[in-house]
Amino acid sequence: MTLDNAFTLKPGRIRASVLARSDPPLKNSRRVIVKARICRHRGGTLNAAKAHLRYMQRDGVTRDGEPGKLYDKTSNNADGKRFLDQASGQRHQFR
């Protein structure tokens, strides 16, 4: 495929051809879909954010049936309370 006809193909087809030609081959790699939304804190409370954290940390999230764990850019064990403290002054939450 040349660069000239790369733009006539659909984006998914371009990604698939790049994956097929990568070294090492990534044909058996998992594809991931990330869904996100921005939510506004209604009434200045963090009740929805607290409920969302409880939902993410509920039992049975992992394949072993363990509760979900929070993570951030620096560690695999993030503190939910610290997250809520930082979010208390924000008008919106990115979920």
Image (tube, rainbow, N blue to C red):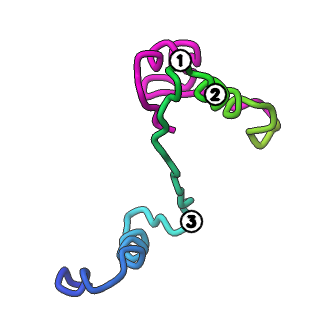
| 17 in relation to 26, above or below | below
The x and y percentages for residue 39 are: 49, 38
Q: Which mark is residue 28?
A: 3
Q: Is residue 45 toward the left or the right of residue 86 in the image? A: right
The x and y percentages for residue 16 are: 43, 74
Among numbered discs 2 and 3, the one appearing first in the sequence? 3
Q: Nearer the viewer, residue 19 or 15?
A: 15
Q: Main secondary structure of the magenta part?
A: loop
Among numbered discs 1 and 3, the one appearing first in the sequence? 3
Residue with the most extreme front position: 43
SS for tag 2?
helix
Please name the residue that numbered disc 1 is placed on: 84
Among numbered discs 2 and 1, the one appearing first in the sequence? 2
Q: Amino acid at mark 3?
A: Asn
| 11 in relation to 43, above or below | below
Please name the residue that numbered disc 2 is placed on: 53
